[in-house]
Amino acid sequence: MKVLDESTFEFIYRTYWQRLFEYARRKVHHNEAAEEIIQELFVKLWEQREKLHILHLEKYLFACVKNQVIDYYKQRLFSELESIDKEVGPDYPIFLDELETRILEAANRLPQKTREIFMMNRLEGKSPSEVSAELNLPQRTVEYHITIALRKLKFDLKDYTFFMTLGGICEILNRI
Protein backbone atom coordinates (compact mmCIF):
# COMPACT_ATOMS: atom_id res chain seq x y z
CA MET A 1 0.00 0.00 0.00
CA LYS A 2 1.31 3.45 -0.86
CA VAL A 3 1.57 6.27 1.68
CA LEU A 4 -1.90 7.39 2.70
CA ASP A 5 -3.16 10.74 1.59
CA GLU A 6 -6.23 12.35 3.15
CA SER A 7 -8.71 11.19 0.53
CA THR A 8 -7.48 7.56 0.64
CA PHE A 9 -7.58 7.61 4.44
CA GLU A 10 -11.12 8.98 4.39
CA PHE A 11 -12.15 6.25 1.92
CA ILE A 12 -10.65 3.54 4.16
CA TYR A 13 -12.33 5.08 7.22
CA ARG A 14 -15.76 5.20 5.55
CA THR A 15 -15.38 1.73 4.04
CA TYR A 16 -14.21 -0.14 7.15
CA TRP A 17 -15.32 1.82 10.22
CA GLN A 18 -18.72 0.17 10.66
CA ARG A 19 -17.49 -3.39 10.09
CA LEU A 20 -14.54 -2.90 12.42
CA PHE A 21 -16.80 -1.34 15.04
CA GLU A 22 -19.25 -4.27 14.88
CA TYR A 23 -16.38 -6.74 15.17
CA ALA A 24 -14.94 -4.93 18.20
CA ARG A 25 -18.37 -4.55 19.82
CA ARG A 26 -19.02 -8.29 19.51
CA LYS A 27 -15.72 -8.93 21.26
CA VAL A 28 -15.89 -6.34 24.08
CA HIS A 29 -19.69 -6.14 24.49
CA HIS A 30 -19.52 -2.40 25.08
CA ASN A 31 -20.23 0.34 22.53
CA GLU A 32 -17.96 3.01 24.00
CA ALA A 33 -15.02 0.64 24.35
CA ALA A 34 -15.50 -0.57 20.77
CA GLU A 35 -15.61 3.03 19.52
CA GLU A 36 -12.40 3.85 21.40
CA ILE A 37 -10.67 0.79 19.95
CA ILE A 38 -11.62 1.74 16.39
CA GLN A 39 -10.82 5.40 16.88
CA GLU A 40 -7.40 4.51 18.29
CA LEU A 41 -6.78 2.21 15.33
CA PHE A 42 -7.48 4.97 12.81
CA VAL A 43 -5.42 7.52 14.74
CA LYS A 44 -2.45 5.14 14.73
CA LEU A 45 -3.02 4.36 11.05
CA TRP A 46 -2.91 8.06 10.21
CA GLU A 47 0.07 8.82 12.46
CA GLN A 48 2.11 5.93 11.06
CA ARG A 49 0.95 6.26 7.45
CA GLU A 50 4.46 6.96 6.15
CA LYS A 51 6.04 3.98 7.90
CA LEU A 52 3.45 1.30 7.15
CA HIS A 53 3.77 -1.18 4.31
CA ILE A 54 0.45 -3.02 4.26
CA LEU A 55 -0.15 -5.71 1.67
CA HIS A 56 -3.65 -6.81 2.72
CA LEU A 57 -5.49 -3.84 4.21
CA GLU A 58 -8.60 -5.64 5.46
CA LYS A 59 -6.60 -8.41 7.17
CA TYR A 60 -4.32 -5.79 8.68
CA LEU A 61 -7.21 -3.71 10.08
CA PHE A 62 -9.01 -6.69 11.61
CA ALA A 63 -5.77 -8.03 13.09
CA CYS A 64 -5.14 -4.61 14.66
CA VAL A 65 -8.64 -4.60 16.17
CA LYS A 66 -8.12 -8.12 17.48
CA ASN A 67 -4.86 -7.07 19.15
CA GLN A 68 -6.48 -3.97 20.63
CA VAL A 69 -9.32 -6.10 22.02
CA ILE A 70 -6.72 -8.32 23.68
CA ASP A 71 -5.03 -5.20 25.11
CA TYR A 72 -8.43 -3.96 26.32
CA TYR A 73 -9.00 -7.17 28.29
CA LYS A 74 -5.45 -7.16 29.66
CA GLN A 75 -5.92 -3.59 30.84
CA ARG A 76 -9.26 -4.48 32.46
CA LEU A 77 -7.75 -7.52 34.16
CA PHE A 78 -4.82 -5.56 35.56
CA SER A 79 -7.05 -2.74 36.80
CA GLU A 80 -9.34 -5.30 38.45
CA LEU A 81 -6.36 -7.00 40.08
CA GLU A 82 -5.09 -3.62 41.22
CA SER A 83 -8.45 -2.76 42.77
CA ILE A 84 -8.58 -6.20 44.41
CA ASP A 85 -5.13 -5.59 45.84
CA LYS A 86 -6.32 -2.28 47.31
CA GLU A 87 -9.47 -3.88 48.71
CA VAL A 88 -7.82 -6.86 50.34
CA GLY A 89 -4.99 -4.85 51.80
CA PRO A 90 -1.38 -5.62 52.57
CA ASP A 91 -2.04 -9.24 53.59
CA TYR A 92 -2.96 -10.24 50.05
CA PRO A 93 0.62 -11.18 49.00
CA ILE A 94 0.92 -13.31 52.15
CA PHE A 95 -2.36 -15.00 51.23
CA LEU A 96 -1.07 -15.70 47.71
CA ASP A 97 2.11 -17.24 49.10
CA GLU A 98 0.04 -19.42 51.44
CA LEU A 99 -2.28 -20.39 48.60
CA GLU A 100 0.64 -21.28 46.36
CA THR A 101 2.04 -23.47 49.16
CA ARG A 102 -1.34 -25.20 49.51
CA ILE A 103 -1.49 -25.78 45.76
CA LEU A 104 1.96 -27.37 45.75
CA GLU A 105 1.01 -29.54 48.74
CA ALA A 106 -2.16 -30.64 46.94
CA ALA A 107 -0.13 -31.33 43.80
CA ASN A 108 2.20 -33.57 45.82
CA ARG A 109 -0.84 -35.70 46.78
CA LEU A 110 -1.65 -36.40 43.13
CA PRO A 111 -0.83 -39.81 41.64
CA GLN A 112 2.79 -39.92 40.51
CA LYS A 113 2.19 -39.81 36.73
CA THR A 114 -0.49 -37.09 37.03
CA ARG A 115 1.80 -35.03 39.30
CA GLU A 116 4.75 -35.42 36.92
CA ILE A 117 2.70 -34.32 33.92
CA PHE A 118 1.08 -31.45 35.83
CA MET A 119 4.44 -30.15 37.08
CA MET A 120 6.00 -30.32 33.63
CA ASN A 121 3.06 -28.45 32.18
CA ARG A 122 2.46 -25.83 34.87
CA LEU A 123 5.82 -25.37 36.57
CA GLU A 124 8.14 -25.92 33.63
CA GLY A 125 5.74 -24.29 31.16
CA LYS A 126 5.82 -27.15 28.68
CA SER A 127 2.91 -27.55 26.30
CA PRO A 128 0.94 -30.81 26.30
CA SER A 129 2.61 -31.77 23.01
CA GLU A 130 6.08 -31.18 24.50
CA VAL A 131 5.20 -33.25 27.58
CA SER A 132 3.78 -35.93 25.29
CA ALA A 133 6.97 -36.12 23.27
CA GLU A 134 9.24 -36.12 26.32
CA LEU A 135 7.31 -38.85 28.16
CA ASN A 136 6.45 -40.80 25.00
CA LEU A 137 2.72 -40.65 25.79
CA PRO A 138 -0.22 -39.78 23.55
CA GLN A 139 -1.10 -36.11 23.78
CA ARG A 140 -4.69 -36.96 24.78
CA THR A 141 -3.30 -38.89 27.78
CA VAL A 142 -1.26 -35.86 28.82
CA GLU A 143 -4.30 -33.59 28.46
CA TYR A 144 -6.35 -36.05 30.50
CA HIS A 145 -3.81 -36.02 33.35
CA ILE A 146 -3.68 -32.20 33.33
CA THR A 147 -7.49 -32.03 33.49
CA ILE A 148 -7.60 -34.55 36.34
CA ALA A 149 -4.91 -32.62 38.23
CA LEU A 150 -6.74 -29.31 37.87
CA ARG A 151 -10.05 -30.84 38.97
CA LYS A 152 -8.41 -32.46 41.99
CA LEU A 153 -6.61 -29.28 42.97
CA LYS A 154 -9.76 -27.18 42.68
CA PHE A 155 -11.58 -29.70 44.86
CA ASP A 156 -8.75 -29.84 47.41
CA LEU A 157 -8.67 -26.05 47.55
CA LYS A 158 -12.41 -25.58 47.97
CA ASP A 159 -11.76 -23.68 51.22
CA TYR A 160 -10.44 -20.90 49.01
CA THR A 161 -13.52 -20.77 46.78
CA PHE A 162 -14.35 -17.20 47.79
CA PHE A 163 -11.24 -16.17 45.87
CA MET A 164 -12.37 -18.09 42.80
CA THR A 165 -14.74 -15.22 42.06
CA LEU A 166 -11.74 -12.92 42.12
CA GLY A 167 -9.76 -15.26 39.95
CA GLY A 168 -7.22 -15.98 42.69
CA ILE A 169 -7.02 -19.77 42.49
CA CYS A 170 -7.43 -19.89 38.73
CA GLU A 171 -4.80 -17.18 38.33
CA ILE A 172 -2.32 -19.06 40.51
CA LEU A 173 -3.11 -22.41 38.88
CA ASN A 174 -2.41 -20.83 35.53
CA ARG A 175 0.74 -19.15 36.87
CA ILE A 176 2.30 -22.31 38.31
Image: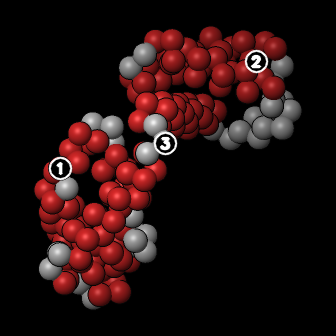
Answer left or right for 93 relative to 56: left
What is the secondary structure assignment of the residue under circle 1?
Answer: helix
Query: Disc 1 versus disc 2: distance between alpha carbons?
Result: 60 Å
Residue of label 3: 90
Helix, strand or loop under label 2: helix
- The three-letter code of the residue at mark 2 reads Thr
Q: In which quarter of the image is the C terminus?
A: bottom left
Between the C-alphas of marks 3 and 1, the distance is 21 Å
- Count residues near mark 3 (Cα–Cα under 10 Å), then give few for <14, some for 14-19, many for 20+: few
Q: Is residue 54 above or below residue 14?
A: below
Figure quadrant of the N terminus: top right
Q: Can residue 5 be seen in this view?
A: yes
Q: Which residue is at a point 20% across and 83% down the rendered structure image? A: 113
The residue type indicated by label 3 comes to Pro
Measured from the top left, where is residue 169 in percent x and y?
30, 50
- Earlier along the polypeptide chain: callout 3 or callout 1? 3
Q: Please give the residue where the numbered disc 2 appears in the rendered image.
A: 8
Q: Give the residue drawn at x 59%, y 17%.
A: 36
42 or 81, which is in the foreground? 81
* Image-based side of 64 in relation to 9, left or right: left
Residue displayed at 73% across by 27% down: 45
Residue 111 in the image: state x and y as whole percent: 15, 80
The residue nearer to you, when weighing 108 against 146, is 108
Q: Which of marks 3 and 1 is in front?
A: 3
Q: In which quarter of the image is residue 2?
A: top right
- Residue positioned 40% across, 59% down in the render: 97
The disc placed on residue 17 is none
Residue 144's spot in the image, x, y percent?
Answer: 17, 68
> Residue beneath label 1, please?
159
